Each structure stands twice: as C-alpha cells, then as structure tokens.
Image (cartoon, grey):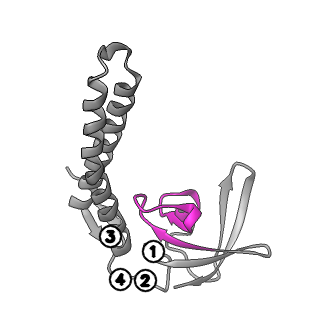
C-alpha cells in the first residue's frame, strides 16, 4: 500500500529540481569511484570509501524523491475559515507574532517558516479558527498561541 504525500505545487517543483541535480551528480561520483579504484588496495582506500558513501547517499535520496513524486497529491484548495494544509497562519504568543505556512512533512522547513501539520505546533493548530487559543507542549513547558489570521 502506497503512502500519499500531500505537497504544494512549489514543493513539487523544488523536489523535481533537487532530483535533477542529484541525477547530474551521478557521473561525477562514478568517476571518483573509478579514480579511487586506480589507487590500488580497496581495503585501505579512504577515497574509495568516501566516494561509495556519497554514491549511497545520492542513490537513497533519488529513490526517496522518486517515491514521493510518484505518490504525490497536490494541495489544491486552501480553506481560509479554519487551518488546513497550504494555509499561511499568523500566531501570537504574548507580544511575539510568528508566521507559518502549514505543509506536509515532506516540505517542512521551520527555518523558512514552513511547518508540518504533524509537528507539535502544526497538529495543535490544525482545524482551528481565528481567535482560538491553543496550548503547545515544548521542551521549556507549555506555550499558548492565539490564532490571529489565516490566509
């Protein structure tokens, strides 16, 4: 049974770009491996080990992205009456305001303001409306957020 990944159109484009870049790196890594083999004994060849590890990481990520792209469901409409995938949300914690875009786990990047609907904050606010308050457990204790706007 395949898992479906809910992502935005922008998220799909970013994955396609990453996939293209990884595929273009394959030849370079294959050349590194071939060059390292020429050094002789592979059991004590650090260059060979590093190149094989890089190849493994690239191939694993390519497989992962291909699976995501084959099983993608694009987020089509954004509900603005309550928080759902694709919404941009403004939250208030005391005097501090934060903006997040709610995305699926595949696209999540908190440093860019994109949080997963499965994250502690994302799951706490998911389905809530403007004006509601939610309590989120963090490593420093509970934090209360008020939902200011949904777009």
- The residue at 66%/54% (across/down) is 137
Q: Let me know if residue 111 is in the magenta part.
A: yes
| Mark 4–mark 2 CB contact (< 8 Å) | yes
Provide the residue span drawn in magenta.
99-122
Per the image, the residue denoted by label 2 is 79
SS class, disc 1: loop
The answer to whether mark 3 and mark 1 are in CB contact below 8 A is no
The residue closer to the viewer here, 125 or 14, is: 14
* Apparent side of residue 47 relative to residue 34 in the rendered image (left or right): right
Say the numbered circle drawn on residue 40. none
Q: Which residue is mark 3?
A: 13
Observer-nearest residue: 100 or 57? 57
Dot 2 alpha-carbon crowd within 10 angstroms: few under 14, some 14 to 19, many 20 or more? some
Sequence-first tag of 3 and 4? 3
Residue 111 location (% of width, % of height): 58, 62
> Mark 1 — residue?
84
Relative image position of residue 93 (x, y in whole percent)? 74, 71
Residue tagged by mark 4?
Answer: 77
Report helix, strand or loop for mark 4: loop
């Amino acid at each position: 049974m395949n898992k479906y990944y809910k992502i935005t159109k922008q998220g799909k484009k970013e994955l396609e770009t990453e996939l293209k870049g990884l595929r273009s790196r394959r030849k370079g890594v294959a050349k590194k491996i071939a060059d390292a083999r020429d050094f002789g004994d592979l059991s004590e060849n650090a260059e060979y080990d590093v190149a094989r590890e890089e190849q493994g990481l690239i191939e694993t990520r390519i497989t992962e992205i291909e699976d995501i792209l084959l099983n993608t469901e694009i987020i089509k409409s954004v509900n603005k009456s309550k928080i759902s995938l694709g919404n941009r949300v403004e939250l208030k914690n005391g005097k501090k305001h934060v903006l997040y875009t709610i995305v699926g786990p595949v696209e999540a990047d908190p440093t860019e303001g994109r949080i997963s609907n499965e994250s502690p904050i994302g799951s706490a606010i998911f389905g809530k409306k403007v004006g509601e308050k939610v309590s989120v457990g963090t490593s420093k204790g509970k934090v209360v957020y008020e939902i200011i706007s949904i777009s």
